[in-house]
Amino acid sequence: MSVFAYRDGVLHAESVSLADIARSVGTPFYCYSTAALEAHYRAYANAFEGQNVGVCYALKANSNLAVVRTLAALGAGADVVSGGEMRRALAAGVPASKIVFSGVGKTRAELRDALLAGIHQINVESIPELEALSEVATGLGVTAEIAFRVNPDVDAKTHAKIATGKKENKFGIDYDHAREVYARAAKLPGIAPVAIAVHIGSQLTDLAPFRAAYERVAALLHTLREDGHDIRRLDLGGGLGITYKDEQPPELTDYAAMVGSITGNLGCAITVEPGRSLVGNAGVLVSEVIFVKQGLHRRFLIVDAAMNDLIRPSLYDAYHGIVPVEEAKAAAAPEPYDVVGPVCESGDTFAVQRPLPPLAPGDLVAVQSAGAYGAVMSSSYNTRPLIPEVLVKGGAFAVIRPRPSLEEMLAAERMPDWLAG
Ligand code: LLP
């Protein structure tokens, strides 16, 4: 059963009514469930039980400190893609020894901070990055344990903007050049190439592309070992999809069995980097209907959340379920609505011609599956304050990021001398 369910006629997160949270913090807001985060993490841990697999949560999906700490407390490590995310992971209690640093454009300052923090592994994506890292590491007198992220040229069969494993994508080093690159790395001071990393894309709903990529990684491992490299770890990336509408992502147990069948006898420690599948369906975005506007051809449900709060529908044409918070409303016969926000762009649309029960100003709706790539991708466009994030645990809830006041927003800016006064 979902942790988001109707109780006594109102949609709850665990034992807390979303309507109560709305009265307390105002709308719109994100609400996450601890029970869901824990269940999703445990599903990974259970599926990989008996295998030498560590789960490094991809912070980019939702980097709120309380969310990261909830997962870290269960044993999760972290996959970070910036110095900022590394700081968050450490601040949330992830030990440095469980942090992996990915990304195509790490700065020297970020590489230095990562080495000083003593993180587990840096996933290098290019020769220039390798050279920079070698210089920074030798300057500090340390050796960086690295993976190269290889680009296996596999079609992840997902949205073009979140596919990363094809030759034409900016990510990783070409599979065909991997031998040369590892040979070069082995000669550089301050560098220990000990791992291979791969990540082919996000929201994958089929195991086949994963399998193809992992088989290529296993083949490369054998070649590199023949070349004399001591490769001890594989980082298999994230990407397992979730159900937004009617997608049927692979079962975690099947994914884990596939990983085991390919890597089980390679003698490597394995890392996986899930983001979305841990947090996506652990969160909803709650919004209030401002107006219902009858256009010439369309009926618009104008809600108080917008593209700046949740950009996925605008950016990827992503589907998110939308349900009334009041159960009685949900029972009424649906009519098609275009669900839109107040931002001054036509792209500020959550759903087009979506069948919804009749709704009126003041009604609350929950936008589902909003725990991943929601709050983290939000902005204050149109001077709309970042919306609060709330974490529920059982019958309790806490604001884990408050809504800034307009005063705070304006106070963050500065007048140059020539305009002051
Ligand atoms: N590891 C690496 C190196 C990644 O680039 C990503 C995601 C992950 C792990 C986690 O992937 P996940 O398990 O969450 O699929 N904003 C987009 C998704 C971008 C994903 C970027 N990389 C969206 O809203 O769909």
Image (tube, helix red, strand yellow):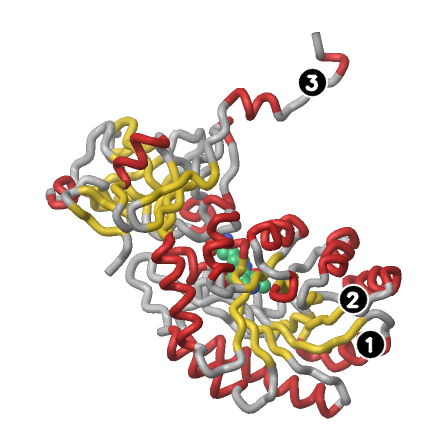
**Looking at the picture, how far across and down is residue 3, in whole percent?**
28, 55
Q: CA distance from mark 3 to mark 2?
A: 41 Å
Circle 1 is placed at which residue position? 184
| Along the line of sight, the residue nearer the viewer: 268 or 243 | 268
The image quarter in which residue 417 lies: top right
Q: CA distance from mark 3 to mark 1?
A: 50 Å
The disc label shown at residue 104, or none: none
Circle 2 is placed at which residue position? 130
**Looking at the picture, how far across and down is residue 319, in whole percent?**
35, 52
Is residue 314 visible in the rendered structure shown here? yes
Task: Say if mark 3 contacts mark 1, CB within 8 Å.
Answer: no
Name the element at disc 1.
helix
Circle 3 is placed at which residue position? 415
Callout 2: CB less than 8 Å from ligand 1: no
Q: CA distance from mark 2 to mark 1?
A: 9 Å
Q: Is residue 140 left or right of residue 165?
A: right
| Along the line of sight, the residue nearer the viewer: 406 or 48 | 48
**Looking at the picture, how far across and down is residue 135, in whole percent?**
86, 62
Residue at coordinates 71% horizontally, 11% vertically from top-left? 420
